[in-house]
Structure formats: C-alpha cells, structure tokens
Image (tube, coloured by chain):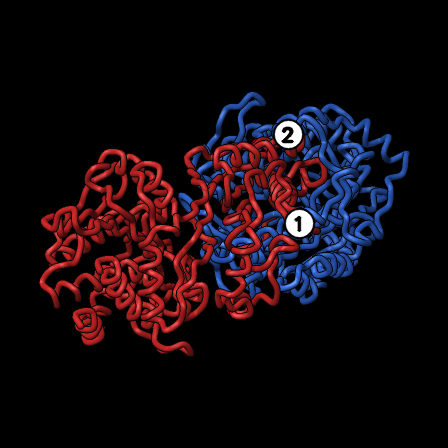
Chain colours: A red, B blue
Amino acid sequence: MSLDTVLNRIDSELDTSIERLCDFLRIPSISTDPAFKADVDRAADWLVNDLQTIGITAEKRTTPGHPMVVGHVGQDLGDTVPHVLFYGHYDVQPVDPLNLWTREPFDPAIEETEHGPVIRGRGSSDDKGQLMTFVEACRAWKDVHGSLPCRITFFFEGEEESGSPSLVPFLEANKDELKADLALVCDTSMVSRGVPSISSQLRGMVKDEFTIVGPRIDLHSGHYGGPGLNPLRELSKIVASFYDDETGKVAVDGFYEGVHDVPAEQLAQWQGCGFDEADYLGSVGYTQPHGEVGYSTLEQQWARPTLEVNGLWGGYNGAGSKTVIPSEAHCKITCRLVGDMDPDALRDKIRKHVEDRLSPDAKVVWDNDLDGSPASVMNISRPEFEAARTALSAEWNREAVFAGMGGSIPVVGYFNTVLGMDSMLVGFANDDDAIHSPNEKYDVKSFHKGMRSWARILDELTK
Amino acid sequence: MSLDTVLNRIDSELDTSIERLCDFLRIPSISTDPAFKADVDRAADWLVNDLQTIGITAEKRTTPGHPMVVGHVGQDLGDTVPHVLFYGHYDVQPVDPLNLWTREPFDPAIEETEHGPVIRGRGSSDDKGQLMTFVEACRAWKDVHGSLPCRITFFFEGEEESGSPSLVPFLEANKDELKADLALVCDTSMVSRGVPSISSQLRGMVKDEFTIVGPRIDLHSGHYGGPGLNPLRELSKIVASFYDDETGKVAVDGFYEGVHDVPAEQLAQWQGCGFDEADYLGSVGYTQPHGEVGYSTLEQQWARPTLEVNGLWGGYNGAGSKTVIPSEAHCKITCRLVGDMDPDALRDKIRKHVEDRLSPDAKVVWDNDLDGSPASVMNISRPEFEAARTALSAEWNREAVFAGMGGSIPVVGYFNTVLGMDSMLVGFANDDDAIHSPNEKYDVKSFHKGMRSWARILDELTK
C-alpha cells in the first residue's frame, strides 16, 4: 500500500514537478561553449538547492572545468540496505541552428502533439528531464515516508556534452565517497514508444578533427583554377574514401577489428522487443536504412560501428559567390564503437587512412584535444536488473526489454574501471525527442511514468 | 617631347597619385554584401568627384543594384580622333578571413617587400589600383596639355565582384552613349613580373550553389548513426565524383564539349612569354601543377576549363564536438569556361551529374540566382593592339606579349554582343597580388609604370 501512496503523490504533484523542471530548463547550461560558463555554474547551484529541499546533503564541487554536484542521503541506514549511486548530467547541447526552433530553446512550455503533451525546450529530454524523473521520485517518496528506503548517492555532471574532461580525475579523487553497489543512470531512450527498456549495451566513441591545408593563402580561381590544389576537393575525396558505397561499410583499414556479430539468440530477442522500424525511419524522413548492407536497422544502430562526419567547412559561405580556392578545409568526425574496438588504435587507423591519401602539396593538421571511450556491455545477470524489469513491466503494462543502445555514455565505462561499479541504465526518452537538435522535447508521459517507474524500482530494490 | 613631359609629370606626382588611390581604398565598397551598400555608393561618388577634378563630365547613374559611373571628355574633338571607352570596377571582394590580414583591409599603406614597395589593402590591385593607372595618366596628360588627345568615355561598374546583375540592362539602355571604337580594360595581370602583357583570351564562368538535404531535422549520431543518411557524406561523395583523380579531368559527362586544344603556334608563343612557373607555383606553396595531366601549367591556367568548389559547409563548426547528423550540407561552385563551352548547357550537365548520383532519401536544392558567361577571344589583329604593344615594350624595356588569362571578365563579352565593340585588356597586376585573398597588394612599380604605360598607349593611339 505504501508504494501506491507514493505513486498517488507523484500523480497529484505532477504539475508542480513539471514547473520545477521548467525552472531548471530555463538555465542555458551549454557546456561546450565557454560563453555559457556562468550558466552551467548556475545550473549546478540550482540542483544543489533542489536536492537540499528533499533533505539531501548536497554540494557543488569545483573541477578544472564545470562543477560536479554530489549529494548523499541515508548513510544512517547502515550496510543492511542497498546503496545506489544515481548519475545524470545537467549540461546541455548547443542550440544551433536557432532559426529552426519553433520557440526559444530556453523558454520551455507544454505543447500538445499527436502523441500527447510534451515539454518543449533544450535539455527537456537530454538530460535534465530524465534526471529529474529520479529526483522527483525521491521527493515523492520522502514526502510520503519521511525518508528514503536506501542509501543514495547523487552524482551530477556538467561536462557530459563536452567530453567530460574532469570526470575521471574526479572519480579517482573521490573513489570512497562515490563507490556504491550499483550506479543507476537515466540518460537513455525506450526502444519504441511505450516499451520500457533497460540497456544491455552502449556504443563507445572516438572524436577527431582535422584541417586540410593546401596553398599558403586563399587564391583567386581565375589565377590558380586548374593548376591549383583545392583543399575542399581534397577533403571531399578523403571523406568519400572513408566509405565503401557498395557495402555501406567504413573503408578504413582495420576499422572492424574487435567488432563481433550479435549472437543469434540476442538478435531474436531484439527483433521481438517492439522496435518500430517504420516509425523510427519515417519520423525523420527516411524510407530505408542507410548503413551496412546485410544488417538490420537495429543492428546498424546498436551493434555496428560508424564513422560519422559531424561538421565540414571551408571557403566562402556568405551571400552571393566568391571565386576563391581557400587555403584550408576543416572536418569534425566521431566514431561509434562496439565490442572490443580500441579507441586509441582506431584513431590511429583513421589518421593513417587520411595521411595515406593526401595529394602532394596537401598537409593535414590534427586536433589532439579530443577524447575517446570504448563500448560497454551491462552485467544484466545482477538481481537488480530483474527487479527493475519487474517494476518497469508493472508500470508500463508490458514486459520490459533488454535493449541495445546506439549512443555512448562514457561514464558507465569509468564507473567500471575506476570505481569497480556496474551500472544499470533505465531511460524514458523517445526517438522523436530531437535531442541535440532544434525543438527538443520530452513527453509528459515519459516524465510522469518515469517518476512512477523509479518509485517502483526503489520499492523493488528494497523489498 | 610632349610625351616625355607627361611621363615626367607622372614621375614627379607619384606620391600624390598614391595618396589619391589610398583615399579611394579606404572606402569598403564590398558589393556582394548588402551591409556595405552605402559604402559602394560612396565609392561611386568619390570617382565622380575625382573625374570632375580632371575636367571630365561625370555622373553617378542609378541601377536596381549598385550605381554605374559614366564620364565623357573630348566630344568637341569630333570624329577625326579615336574614341575609346575605359572600363574598370570600383567594387571589391569581401575580406574574410579577416584574422589572416596583417593590417586592416581598408587602412591602406605602403609596405616594403622583397620585390620593392607595395600598396597594401583590399582593392589595391583588383581593381581600384588598376583603374587609377588610367585615370591618373589622363590627369597628367591634362595637366601638361590642357586637354586629352582623343575622345574618352569612362565607364566604372560597382557590381563586378557580385555577378554584374545590372550590367547588361544598363548597356542595352545606353548603347549610343557607351559605344566607342574600342574598349580599354585594366583588370588583368602580367604573365610574369616585369613582362608587359596584353590579353589574347579570357575564360568564361558558370556559378552554382546547391544544398543536399537528408533527414528532416538534425539527428543525434547515437540514435541514427548507422541507419541514418548523412548529407555531409553525401556531399563529399558527390564533390569527389566531379573529378577523375587519375587524369585530373572533370568527370562530368560532356564537360569538355566546346573545348579546343591550343594551336601549336600559340602554345610555342606562350611558352616563350616569360611566365615563371616555379615562382607562380612556389609563391603559394605548390611544388607541382595539380590540373589535367598532359597539359602545361600555362594551359591549365589559361586554356583548360575547371570545376572549382569555393565553399562547403554543414553540421557543427564551433568549439569542441557535437555528435550531430545534420539535416543539410551546402556547396558553392564555379566553373571556368574556355573555347565554345556554353554556360547554360554546362550548368545543366553539372546538375544532372549531381542528381544522378543522389542516394535514396537525399534531395538537392539549387540556387537559381547565379549567372554565367562564355569565354572570350580578343581581336588582336586590330591596329590598336600593335600600338599598345609598341607602347608597352618601350615602357617596360622588353617586348610585350599576347598572353592568355585564367580569369573571367564578362563585360568583355557584353561589350561585344550588346555594343558590337571589341576590347583590349592591358593590366599590371602580379600573380602574388593576393587579389580576393587576405593581404591584397599592388606593387608601386605596377602603379607607377602602369600610369606611364597608359600615357604611352594614348600617345601611340593618337599619333
């Protein structure tokens, strides 16, 4: 009966929970852009204050980059109760291109859509809305019971969208404080609308950036068009050479080292997990998958590696025309890693691929400030995963699934390697949330049932 | 003796001539960018006033775009003297990337270099400095003789760097006023430092711009990396497909229709014209020509067509990383045309090439506001060409050459088709002038001997 009281409390307080989330969303905590440094800091302060209103001992901790927020509750309960760490990130992606937003990104509001009401605004899904499902579940629990049912450490990062440069040093320096039985992470999506999902694996990531340098200065194409090497053409040639258009594979030598095919049993389970391929593709304007030939859309998304160009630029991009052969052309790439792919080895292979293909008189300059992280596989045999599956299945009225995940959450790897701690990822985002894009939103249903889901999971974990 | 008096006057007044040019260069008359509209207008006013101080009847004429400047002198001399039209343009290229300039682009000054003093600033060479060689030659002639030796129409355009949208309508509407025996144009360079050059042919131009559209919105590469079509990859594939890397040729079907090989006799003349290939390539950091295999550097520059990418952009180009699959990728191109290549037909071939190579789910959107013009061959059998060759050879102490030219000066074609008037192009720019680039300059020697050259040409034409 006490769980029902908590769930009823969540229902009756939904509007004030949304109001609190909107308050949080109004802070433009874009971590990758130094212009927003003070706003990132303000978002950390907001979280500290919010946790304190639930009776959680919380502090902002400085780092060389953006601050961490750490909170504790239930230490007095001793070792007989579980101890979980809840992780989320309070920073958000940049908002460009701003002209494609239908409202100000940091002026959130409820909007009606064909799938019901949504909370529209940058960070509503990734990750402020998601992390608040857990915080608000704790608030309801505390309101009803006066205390929480287990030891909980709250750990919120402000650099997830900008490579987490301070994360590992902070984990190293605060091992004893942060180590718990299990990390809970709410930064993932459901395989399909209404299908509760626990992540069984995540892809890793390698980031890189390079500049192709041609002539010493920008040239006039009337004087040098013909004899002149054009870095934009050179860059296009190199990017095109990354791919084999016949097979859809990445054509970098050794790229697939460490990649394993998905076992047939797991593949069968994925195919039955309720993933709606037509909706996933059609909602963004695709009529077919464009990845490796011979692999299903789900495999392409969850279990196959990628080399993606995230930015290309060079020459003139203003109004009208300019007959320039530019001196430089620029390219940002990221790879998604699976299986045992080694981030550092992969970066070396890609760089060799580029350098081997440079024309005479072309040079390449690399950005050496970008990071990488390997793929992760979850330890789904732990009893907490079964508890979560029971809780989620009850809340969503259909069996929860163990699903792959195409994104990368490096912290999961670091929890494992630095703290020796497994993670369990449960998230309520939908594929159409437009995270990292204009018009990001979070379904009110995700927020509402997300809070209820965490209350049920806390209940199952402490039964 | 009277020519010597004019030449002496040019020598003694050099400093004040440079001062007047610098005054002109301080006006940022960037025609392609609407933000500079008032400055373009101000440059036209400056020219009108400058011509009036030499006793030339001059006016600013409005057009739907930037104004024209038209001036007349010597109508009272009747039909027994030659009538020439002098053409130049008073607009300039944009200055980006501004950070590569060693001084403010519109704060000109004399700087010492290994090749002697130069006038540094945007427009110093292209075309304000060049057009002022003629205007200042007229000023010296007038100062010495009290009048000019022939009828001269001055015609200055403010849209040369932005596609000349008003040019043809203006020529059509003012045929009778603008028609002369021959047009003189000072907007070209010398084949090599110190080698006086008369242009025998110019390349034409086709401009185009397109956008590749992939997904309906920007996507997260964790959610869609793999199955998702990336327009940046698509654009790179298409740009790379424009070229055959083995032969250096453009691989667009039918691209070379209308291209003729240079006759052996003309080629021999070019090879002996003093073009310094090592300096031409080495001054911008090239160790070899990068155009079509089997053609000399001069042929690649003067007599072969090109398809050049002038701008590429899409995705994220800010600080750090963004795991985005963008919705759009953009590309600006220009082609240089030779022989009988047809601009409209060529544009159609390129568009078909792109459209034939689009992946499913990719679309292309074309900019239909960009123009084109065919290549031009000069009528060098006219006696004025021999007169100019005599004058230039005397001034530069070496025989002047008839040289090809890699650039495009569409007005030459329009003088022919609209006014039935031939053109003679004499210019004093050097290949290292960095026109259209940061740190544009004009050698003081070019300016000084340019003025003297025009005085000698006027003298030869009216002997």
- For the question of whether residue B82 can be seen, the reply is no
Label 1: which residue?
A: B239
| Tally of marks | 2
Q: Secondary structure at mark 1?
A: helix
Name the residue at 19% across, 61% down.
Answer: A138
Q: Nearer the viewer, residue B63 or A295?
A: A295
Q: Identify the residue at image location x=11%, y=65%.
A: A145
Is any atom of residue B398 visible in this view? yes
Q: Chain of mark 1?
A: B
Report the Cα–Cα distance between label 2 and label 1: 20 Å
Q: Is residue B242 above or below residue B165?
A: above
The chain identifier of the residue carrying mark 2 reads A
Q: Position of residue A121 (x, y in %)?
A: 33, 65
Quadrant of res A356: top right
Q: Residues within 10 Å of mark 2 (few under 14, many from 20)?
A: some
- What is the secondary structure assignment of the residue under circle 2? loop
Q: Which residue is mark 2?
A: A361
Q: For residue B395, what is the image quadrant? A: top right
